[in-house]
């Protein structure tokens, strides 16, 4: 993608499907090559890229083969390059078509899976700078998640402090599965910084594969890896509650992205029931886990993993017991629906409005601050 | 649950004309020496000398201590103070008679040969546990049925054990743990499924196992609530593996019962599998039908611990989605999270006929109990 392509891509003035009354909370961009990061690396790492040939080191993440059908809708592929690497395509297909007020960019980059924590910190820092310069600067509708070098919480906090002044970064980004369950106190400095800066903790489907993606071991197929992500989210949700993260950081919000949500009701029932039996072990958990989760945790809409017809989706949402938890997303350029059918028709108009706009604004304080007054109230 | 709240007097299932097939009863040896008559001298010595050699830090205990001694109901201790589940006479009085159990299926967990890294020792232990169930429990009470435990990491030995036991009709299923070294749909385990099918035995998978993988994709949780709940996700990934690997295409008559893993999550898993199959079809061309069709045809669930949504109507909806014909009652006796047959299904809005089906009819048909 040349600089000219980006510069010439002016946002459409058509209102799109939602006429600006939508916030897309999960849109993917991809680093086309490490070469684009080199300008944002310091001298040591620039030299390392050159002498070690790091740009030849593929950074695709295992959980998301970029050519698998689910990860790139045919009509959302750019004419050249990998899905999610072209601003003009994203503007046309994700922003203009849906009439998106803001879209939150999530860049799932392989640096989070490296073992060298300083290399990860350098590359994640460069990715964030690249996002600011090459994406956020070029379209006022774009917002982004801060890619965190999750190998080391101190490095994460440094990166948060470095980006927090740029209000276009609206949350931090962690993979759903990593070296430790996310509730562990090891990670609490990250949550302290996030709470202080009004940054929700975005947890996106994916794994650094430090362990098999499920307790049953290593599956054969990418299909299995994708399905069992839901279980990974369930485990992380209970970890965050059981360790007391929300008791310690009462203003913290956690957003699960590309997680699905049909698994939530039975998970909430099971968490409540088990907590009643064994709560003596975690005395800092003072309420039903479901109550804590409904207050602190949000989930993005796509993929909608309940059938949208036959009343099942409505039943699932009723069982979740809250209209506040779902946040609109297209998961662009991933392929979960056809045309513009991102928001199931069967939802009530009031709930649609909450999902599209009100819930995202309530979740992301930084979007509230920069939203035009007419959509803020 | 062992909470000392006085319960309202209610008719027992027997008084209500219901009988129970309890698909999850845990026996226990009073001491490991109970198994010695069923083990070769060489393995007795091995046990005494080297003990358990497993894929976790504690050799003889789980690494998340439970909230009650021996994970048991506080009232399940036999009069002589021996381990809950270890005294058949007490079990008969305290559970089988008191709760109107018509048949009870043994699920032996402690001293499991399935977990052993030394495969020959694991096989010897499994075989001893199998003899011990028959001698100690089935001979004592004709209502009790046993499970053939096998060392699944040595499929050839597991097959030999299944073939050896199959003619003893008091064995009603093959038992393997959901957490093995690899996902159980992998082809290395197919000989076990083949032997089960050949002997017309279902496979029961009770939560647990020591496959060496942490209980989440992000390592171990800190607390028992996390470990306890993670067994649900284990069951989900187990189904995912069995279906996607094509086990049910290969073994169309294979029957599976998932024990103590819950069931309320099954509809959501089916929806997820079916939805994403649309995109991943080209990766798994061996699947000829939607994943949920395999699940619904081949996989059944025990009920304990029964889910307790705030709104009981939600439980009814879930049961409708799963299907009354796929749920088998279980108590988990003598464990702390025991489901009392007098109360467990009362909030589900079931008709008497549906309740009877779940309490006993489904299991009788599944296991061929007369």
Image (cartoon, coloured by chain):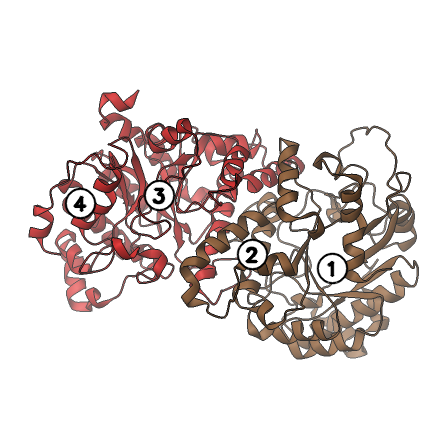
First of labels 3, 4 by sequence position: 4
Q: Are marks 1 and 3 on the same chain?
A: no
Local packing at callout 4 (Cα closer than 10 Å; few below 14, some 14-19, many 20+) is many
**Residue B18 in the image: x percent, y percent?**
86, 44
User: Which is nearer the eye, A364 or B208?
Assistant: A364
Q: Which residue is mark 1?
A: B110
Q: Which residue is mark 3?
A: A341
- Check the picture and name the quadrant holding the C terminus of chain A: top left
Chain letter for mark 3: A
* SS at badge 1: loop
User: Which is nearer the eye, B116 or B134?
Assistant: B134
Residue A135: numbered disc? 4
| Colour assignment, chain B | brown
* SS at badge 4: loop
Local packing at callout 2 (Cα closer than 10 Å; few below 14, some 14-19, many 20+) is many
Q: Are marks 4 and 2 on the same chain?
A: no
Q: Is residue A213 above or below residue B310?
A: below
């Amino acid at each position: 993608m040349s600089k000219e392509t980006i510069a010439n891509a002016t946002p459409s003035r058509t209102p799109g499907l939602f006429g600006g009354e939508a916030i897309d909370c999960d849109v993917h961009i991809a680093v086309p090559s490490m070469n684009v990061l080199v300008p944002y690396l310091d001298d040591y790492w620039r030299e390392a890229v050159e002498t070690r040939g790091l740009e030849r080191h593929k950074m695709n993440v295992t959980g998301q083969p970029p050519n698998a059908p689910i990860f790139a809708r045919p009509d959302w592929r750019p004419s050249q390059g990998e899905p999610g690497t072209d601003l003009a395509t994203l503007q046309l297909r994700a922003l203009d078509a849906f009439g998106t007020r803001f879209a939150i960019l999530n860049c799932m980059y392989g640096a989070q899976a490296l073992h060298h924590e300083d290399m990860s910190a350098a590359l994640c820092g460069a990715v964030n700078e690249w996002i600011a310069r090459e994406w956020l600067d070029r379209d006022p509708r774009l917002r982004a998640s801060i890619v965190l070098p999750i190998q080391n919480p101190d490095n994460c906090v440094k990166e948060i402090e470095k980006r927090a002044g740029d209000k276009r970064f609206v949350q931090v980004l962690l993979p759903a599965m990593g070296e430790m369950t996310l509730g562990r106190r090891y990670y609490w400095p990250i949550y302290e910084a996030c709470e202080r800066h009004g940054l929700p903790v975005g947890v996106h489907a994916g794994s650094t594969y430090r362990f098999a993606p499920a307790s049953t071991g290593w599956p054969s197929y990418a299909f299995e890896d994708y399905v069992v992500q839901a279980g990974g989210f369930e485990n992380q949700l209970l970890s965050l509650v059981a360790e007391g993260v929300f008791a310690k950081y009462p203003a913290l919000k956690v957003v699960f992205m590309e997680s699905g949500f049909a698994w939530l009701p039975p998970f909430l029932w099971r968490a409540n029931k088990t907590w009643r039996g064994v709560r003596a072990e975690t005395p800092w958990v003072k309420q039903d886990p479901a109550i804590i989760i409904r207050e602190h945790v949000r989930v993005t809409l796509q993929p909608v993993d309940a059938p949208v017809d036959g009343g099942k989706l409505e039943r699932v949402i009723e069982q979740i017991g809250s209209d506040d938890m779902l946040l609109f997303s297209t998961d662009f350029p991933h392929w979960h629906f056809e045309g513009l059918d991102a928001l199931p028709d069967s939802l009530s108009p009031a709930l649609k409005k909450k999902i599209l706009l009100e819930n995202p604004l309530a979740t992301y304080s930084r979007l509230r601050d920069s939203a035009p007054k007419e959509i803020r109230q | 649950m062992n909470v000392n709240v006085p319960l309202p007097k209610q008719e027992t299932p027997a008084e209500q004309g219901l009988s129970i097939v309890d698909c999850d009863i845990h026996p226990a040896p009073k001491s490991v020496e109970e198994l010695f008559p069923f083990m070769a001298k060489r393995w007795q010595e091995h046990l005494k000398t080297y003990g358990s050699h497993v894929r976790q830090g504690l050799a003889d205990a789980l690494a998340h201590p439970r909230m009650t001694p021996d994970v048991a109901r506080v009232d399940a201790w036999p009069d002589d103070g021996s381990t809950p589940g270890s005294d058949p006479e007490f079990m008969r009085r305290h559970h089988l008679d008191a709760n109107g159990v018509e048949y009870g299926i043994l699920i032996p967990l402690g001293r499991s040969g399935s977990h052993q890294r030394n495969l020959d020792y694991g096989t010897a232990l499994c075989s001893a546990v199998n003899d011990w169930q028959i001698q100690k429990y089935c001979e004592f009470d004709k209502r009790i049925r046993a499970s053939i435990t096998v060392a699944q990491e040595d499929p050839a030995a597991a097959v030999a054990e299944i073939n050896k036991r199959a003619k003893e009709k008091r064995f009603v299923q093959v038992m393997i743990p959901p957490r093995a070294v690899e996902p159980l749909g992998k082809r290395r385990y197919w000989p076990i499924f083949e032997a089960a099918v050949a002997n017309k035995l279902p496979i029961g998978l009770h939560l647990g196992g020591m496959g060496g993988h942490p209980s989440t994709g992000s390592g171990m949780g800190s607390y028992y609530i996390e470990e306890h709940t993670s067994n649900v996700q284990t069951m989900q990934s187990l189904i995912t593996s069995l279906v996607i690997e094509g086990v049910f295409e290969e073994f169309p008559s294979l029957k599976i019962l998932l024990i103590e893993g819950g069931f309320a999550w099954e509809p959501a898993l089916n929806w997820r599998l079916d939805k994403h199959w649309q995109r991943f079809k080209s990766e798994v061309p061996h699947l000829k039908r939607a994943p949920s069709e395999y699940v619904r045809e081949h996989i059944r669930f025990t009920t304990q611990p029964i889910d307790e949504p705030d709104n009981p109507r939600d439980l009814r909806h879930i049961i409708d989605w799963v299907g009354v014909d796929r749920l088998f009652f279980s108590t988990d006796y003598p464990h702390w999270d025991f489901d009392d047959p007098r109360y467990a299904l009362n909030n589900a809005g079931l008709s008497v006929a549906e309740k009877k089906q779940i309490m006993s009819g489904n299991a009788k048909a599944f296991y061929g109990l007369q």
